[in-house]
Image (cartoon, coloured by chain):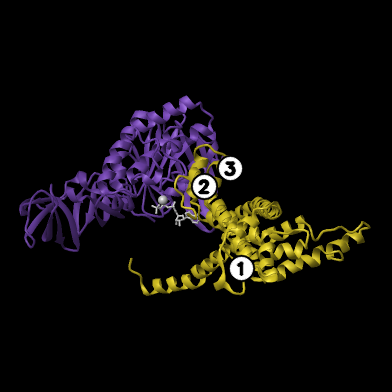
Chain colours: A yellow, B purple
Amino acid sequence: MKLSKHGYFYLIWMAIFIAIPLFMVAYLAFTSGDSQSISLANFSLENFKRFFTPMYLEVLKKSIQLAFISTIICFLLGYPVAYIISKAKLKNRNILILLFVIPMWMNFLLRTYAWLTLLGKNGIINLLITKLGFQPLDLLYNDTAVLLGMVYNFLPFMVLPIFSVLTKMDNSLIEASWDLGANKLKTFLKVIFPLSLPGVLSGVTMVFIPAVSTFVISSLLGGNKTYLIGNLIEQQFRYTGDWHFGSAMSIILMVFILISMALTSKFDKDKEGDVSGLW
Amino acid sequence: MAKVHTIDLINLSKKFGEDLVLDNMNLYIRQNEFLTLLGPSGCGKTTTLRIIGGFENPTEGKVVFEGNDITGLPPYLRQINTVFQRYALFPHLNVFENIAFGLKIKKKSNEEIKKKVTQMLELVNLAGFEKRNIESLSGGQQQRIAIARALVNEPKVLLLDEPLGALDLKLRKEMQIELKKMQQSVGITFIYVTHDQEEALTMSDTVVVMDKGKIQQIGTPIDIYNEPQNRFVAQFIGESNILDGIMEKDFKVWFLSKEFICVDKGFDKDEKVDVVIRPEDVEIVEEDKAQLMGIVKNVLFKGVHYEMEVQTNDYTWKIHSTIMKDAGSYVGLRIVPDNIHVMRKEK
Ligand SMILES: Nc1ncnc2c1ncn2[C@@H]1O[C@H](COP(=O)(O)OP(=O)(O)OP(=O)(O)O)[C@@H](O)[C@H]1O
Ligand SMILES: [Mg+2]
């Protein structure tokens, strides 16, 4: 294969920023010893064995559960939003989609911190509730708060790809469906929705992956109640100093994500004939 | 009782914003008729078809289907099907599922669906294509699937918007013949849109010539060709020599500073008129029999005839003749009264 100048540039880029780090993570995962002196480490499967114990598996299960639920909520909220915006007049459409994107320009941490002020013991919502004469609620530091944070942060990633498929959809296909006797609901179910599946698939991918590996949202909004695989990995690198175990967990998470994405796109391909998904 | 028309368009007007796209259109379409809307790009053909199909609402006027007003009725409640310009086949369904779409919506039984789809595939000469992917079909095949998908619903009316526009010339000619055969064998009303005048003339029972949102002439292909009602139709259909003339009195028209005998009457005295003469109606004759003399400017051999341009005083004639004359030769021209078409000038 002959590569252009740009080709070489990307190759070097990928080597530095993807291949080498990945290799280092894999190396660390399959070795054990003192993290500070990498060269002395020797091959071992100890880190993986350690992970497959009930305590850690529970954390993985919880992460997957929350990521799964938040992906579904994002889909249920995001699809109608994307659909409505895609049906709006061209002028309004761009404004509406901009409204959705603008919050994403703000710092991710800042946005998540904002929820602390809203949900906290003396936060704005509880202030209102007490003003109305009710007992303040425990809104923060639970799974629901984490879910809320995930949905809030990742919803645009669901809306945008679906919106993009829907606006690009050939309107004459919709008219053809009406023409053949399908009313608006049937047209949606039999034509619009199936044709928008590639967008749904990218949306699901783009929400699920960051949700399953997040540690910021869970540590800010979940406190120590909601402990996810992301937190576990972060802990190994930042506090415990066990880079080997942290790397092993990263690899496990990565493999899990790869498998689940492969399954999703296979499901999509089965239904779609040969719509080219992510794979 | 007068027979009810399949479709009546009554005082139909359509505005997009301030643009008047259809201007007070009146038209009826009989059962089993092959009617073609013909006109230059942007004259409102597609808009007319979309109003009949229910995809667009008229600004004014009514669409009447077998005597019932259906203006405002959504497309899925009309007994009309459409073959879209770019086919609009569903890419997520295979050939069978595409054709079966309308039948499934109508909840027909599986056996019936299977039987009808198979029949349709035979009709369009694509038996055995059930499992094929839409993207794997050629343009002509997709086009036939689109027709099958519409026809399988046994509509009273089939709307076709330039269905052959994307095909190459040879396939186009073949499909013209096939389409006409299909229309005759299934016996339904076709409303066909094209801007190709040859296509319109060969396929239709009735041709509607449109320009700028207005109907210019309605008639059989022969009428339209032989008796164009105005300058636009004459110019648009086939080639024509169009000259400014003055109608001296009945059966006497004056053009190119000469008096000619014609078969038209009923004009005002000395009314200004357009005189239309088809290129094949100008005879090349000896000088003693000639009404006009001219010099041949150029000659092209066109297989059956020669196409030439002959310059007389003030006018260059387009002439089709089987007689060969060299460029530069001096020739006589003659036009028999029957072939001189006099028409009123448009205001
Ligand atoms: N949705 C629309 N909004 C605004 N103007 C439109 C719309 N649809 C059509 N027009 C205008 O109406 C006029 C007639 O369009 P129409 O599509 O009916 O023409 P047509 O005869 O089918 O032409 P063609 O042979 O190019 O397909 C054109 O000037 C077009 O720009
Ligand atoms: Mg058109």
B143 displayed left or right of B291? right
Percent of width and height locating residue B247:
27, 52
Q: Label 1 to label 2, Cα distance in Å?
A: 44 Å
A201 displayed left or right of A136: left
- Say if labels 3 and 1 share a chain: yes
Q: Which percent across, then down, holds residue B203?
A: 30, 39
**Which amino acid type is marked by label 1?**
Gly
Separation of residues labelled 2 and 3 (CA atoms): 24 Å
Q: Is residue B262 above or below residue A115?
A: above
The picture quadrant where one finds residue B246 is bottom left
Per the image, the residue denoted by label 1 is: A33
At 30% from the left edge and 40% from the top edge, which residue is drawn?
B175
Q: Residues within 10 Å of mark 3 (few under 14, many from 20)?
A: some
Residue under pointer 2: A268
The residue located at (65%, 67%) in the rendering is A242
Answer yes or no: disc 1 within 8 Å of ligand 1: no
On residue A184, which mark appears?
Answer: 3
Kind of residue sitting beneath label 3: Lys
Sequence order check, earlier mark of 2 and 3: 3
Viewer-closest of B257 and A68: A68
Contact, CB < 8 Å: mark 2 with mark 3? no
Residue A248 placed where, x, y %? 60, 61
Identify which amino acid the numbered label 2 is placed on. Answer: Asp
- Callout 2 environment at 10 Å: few (<14), some (14 to 19), or many (20+)? many
